[in-house]
Image (tube, grey):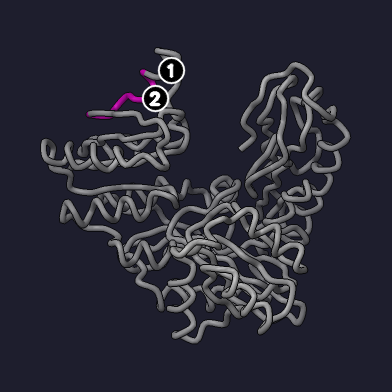
Amino acid sequence: MRYLILNRASLAGRPYPDWLGADHEAVLLTDAATVSSDPEVRSAQLAGYAHAEFFDDFHFNPLVESRAVALHRKMAFDRVIALSEFDLVRAARLRELFAVPGQDVASATAFRDKLEMKRILERAGVPLAPYAPVANLADLLGFIDQQGFPVVVKPRWGGGSIDVHVLHNHQDVDSLLAAHRALGTDDGAQLLAEKYIEHELIHIDGLVVAGETLLMWPSTHGRTTCLDFKEGGALQSSLLDPADPLLTPVRDLTRQALAALPTPDTCMFHAEVFLDADRRLVFNEIASRMGGGLIEGVLRLGFGITLPEVYVGALSGRTPPRIPAEPVQIAGWSLFPPRAGTLVEIPDTCPVPGISVYSRHAEPGTVLEAAQLSVSKIGSVLATGHARDEVETALTEALAWFERSTVIRPGAEGGEAGSTT
């Protein structure tokens, strides 16, 4: 079979031809930034592909779909694969154009458009925070009059906590208006407002193959949240212990959401649930893709699998490996975000006990900007242990060590700007 791959992640971690197997052919359309300028490295990255093309401005470039259609006329694709949240609807459109199996536009939209998602979940009785679409200022003020401050406003089609605002007062409303000029247009903005809930954020990651859920395990962000990066705070997460009393109710709520939505027969998923101040579970949202941050690494340490590899292999007809019913060890991760300034010193190795992997993501001399994404980072760690509290202790100690060992001087002092995502 011939597979069209839409890709925007590093090719070093996405060997699609190997995942599909030798009996299948892979054609790659990828972001130009994922391909090395070094000829030898590029050759290794593209080994195994029958054809590959690269695109600048991949996210907004309509030529990606145009070339896919032109190539389909010549090559007749049997399947379309996309792992990024921002390519799910694009891939679904191509499947419908090509009349090939896989997630359709209605399903992809239900998992991408947060308003459509919440309407479906609400009809199914899934507990949600109060919400409303926001196309203009009148919509927003009406919601605030009903619910009061604080209010969360986010893009309906967003991801990675990009452009998420927590409004505490009318000054924050004015700031939102300055950032979203579409709120003043006849077409309106594509935003969603929700009542803010004080919470501990739990995320649930898993895999469905041929309609059977092979993996569903929750993790907690503990005292951190996906919005802490706006204040320069680290983001961390740890798998729940098998004996945690939250395990069963969180998984039951996730199953309820998956049953309500038009879930594909085979898909990865990443869900979020709030545990509010009264210990009640409130469903936030769910995506039909791999979770971000270092979730892939945690699942590899905890369950012994590379989740995207198992998913792509299942799409190509491979029998999935046996996945343990519970983690073989508890694992967690932490991301150390940048702050504005010039990076002077950053450590090479981490001496903290319990840390399995430490990575640095910026070099001395790099001019840093404040984090724009919840997964922005200049350093990161993966930790393992026998229990969640052991893992969280290692993550806390690693953060303290990293902050002591890293020097960022305010201002740009002749360095070179660099990516920290």
Residue at image coords 25%, 36%: 26
* In the foreground, 318 or 258: 258
In the image, what residue type sits under mark 2? Answer: Gln
Q: Left or right: where does residue 401 sit relative to residue 173?
A: right
Distance of label 2 from label 1 (alpha carbons): 6 Å
Is 21 magenta? The answer is no
Q: Is residue 180 left or right of residue 18?
A: right
Q: What element carries label 2?
A: helix
The reply to whether the magenta stretch includes residue 47 is yes
- Describe residue 350's horizontal placement relative to residue 374 as left or right: right
Residue underneath mark 2: 45
Against 257, is 166 above or below?
A: above
Q: Along the line of sight, which residue is nearer the eye, 106 or 102?
A: 106
Side of 256 where 389 appears, left or right: right
Marks 2 and 1: CB-CB under 8 Å? Answer: yes
Residue at the image position 36 percent from the left and 47 percent from the top:
82
Dividing the picture into quadrants, the one containing residue 173 is bottom right
Residue to which mark 1 is pinned: 41
Secondary structure beneath disc 1?
Answer: helix
The answer to which of 147 and 309 lies nearer the viewer is 147
Residue 182, how many percent across, how many down?
52, 58
The residue positioned 28% from the left and 38% from the top of the image is 21
Q: In this view, does 48 lie above or below 178?
A: above
Dominant secondary structure (helix, strand or loop) of the stretch shown in magenta: loop
Label placed on residue 177? none
Pinpoint residue 38: horizontal percent, then vertical percent. Answer: 45, 14
Residues in magenta, as a range: 43-50
Instruction: Tell me if mark 2 has few (under 14), some (14-19) or many (20+) residues whose alpha carbon lies within 10 angstroms of its own.
Output: some
